[in-house]
Amino acid sequence: MARVLLIEDDDAIRISLGKSLTAAGHVVSAVAAGADGVAAVAREKPEVLLLDLGLPDLDGRDVLAMVRAVSDVPVIVATARDDDASVVRLLDAGADDYVIKPFSAAQMDARIRAVLRRLGTDQQGESTVEVGGLRIDPRSREVSVDGAPVELTRKEFDLLLALSRRPGAVVSKRELLAEVWGLPWGGGDRTVDVHLSWLRRKLGETAAEPRFLHSVRGVGVKLAVPDGDG
């Protein structure tokens, strides 16, 4: 189903999880060290990365940052901490999903399929969206403003796409957390706010002077046709 790279230093977990995911239909490669994992991401271009945070050579969060510098591969992090603040920090750092230790191979397989479904296959049948001078192509994942291409990270694109599915409607931050980050609970407003700030900057606007992205205090955000663009 997917090319999976596993970065896990525990031999028993690495071997057992690799066998189980292979039996589930995935093509799995595995390494035991963070540095080797970063090199493997660049070399093998996996479709999903499974990252254990407790590695012998590098902190898992540093590995995540290095991976994000070279790839937009979906990353599922294995962590022993399940408090909201820790999870939000991981998502802010670039993780797409997480599992709490201990976890089963079946649970990890379900997470892999959910991430792939959320980030890719469900966008292939969508049509290009145009809002004023903003053009969003879900299939090629390309965005342009007034004909000029705009380079977005995967999360920035997914956030913009989620808003484009409801043009003119106010979308709550909780809805965005559920759709873009897969988190159907509150507490991650900062995650949405930070990505909105980055997205606005790349679209050539600010919160004080919005063109496309309009915040409604206490409610959410909407994507709207700017005055004079329609």
Image (tube, grey):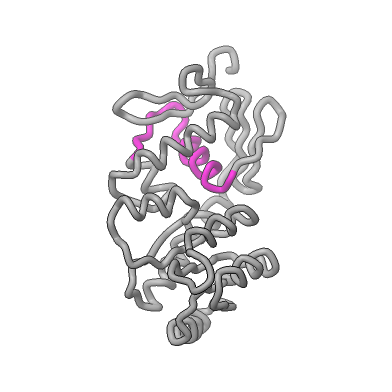
Q: Is residue 119 left or right of residue 178?
A: right
State the image coordinates of residue 172 (x, y, percent, origin top left). Answer: 34, 35
Q: Is residue 135 left or right of residue 174?
A: right
Q: Nearer the viewer, residue 16 or 38?
A: 38
State the image coordinates of residue 46 (x, y, percent, origin top left). Answer: 61, 67
Please tell me which residue is depicted at 62% across the width and 72% down the height of the picture. 36
Residue at the far front: name it. Answer: 57
Please tell me which residue is depicted at 48% across the width and 72% down the height of the picture. 55
Query: Is 186 above or below relative to 78?
Result: above
Q: Nearer the viewer, residue 197 or 122?
A: 197
Q: Is residue 175 left or right of residue 133?
A: left
Please tell me which residue is depicted at 40% across the width and 25% down the height of the picture. 215
In the rendered image, the quadrant that contains the N terminus is bottom right
Q: Quadrant of residue 44?
A: bottom right
State the image coordinates of residue 133 (x, y, percent, origin top left). Answer: 63, 24
Query: Is 85 above or below relative to 136?
Result: below
Is residue 45 visible to us here? yes
State the image coordinates of residue 110 (x, y, percent, origin top left). Answer: 41, 69
Specify the segment rendered in magenta.
153-173
Query: Is 95 above or below relative to 165?
Result: below
Q: How many marks?
A: 0
Is residue 1 visible to us here? no
Q: Quadrant of residue 43?
A: bottom right
In the rendered image, the quadrant that contains the C terminus is top right
Say whether residue 171 is magenta: yes
Please tell me which residue is depicted at 68% across the width and 25% down the height of the picture. 146
Q: Is residue 201 left or right of residue 61?
A: right
Say whether residue 64 is magenta: no
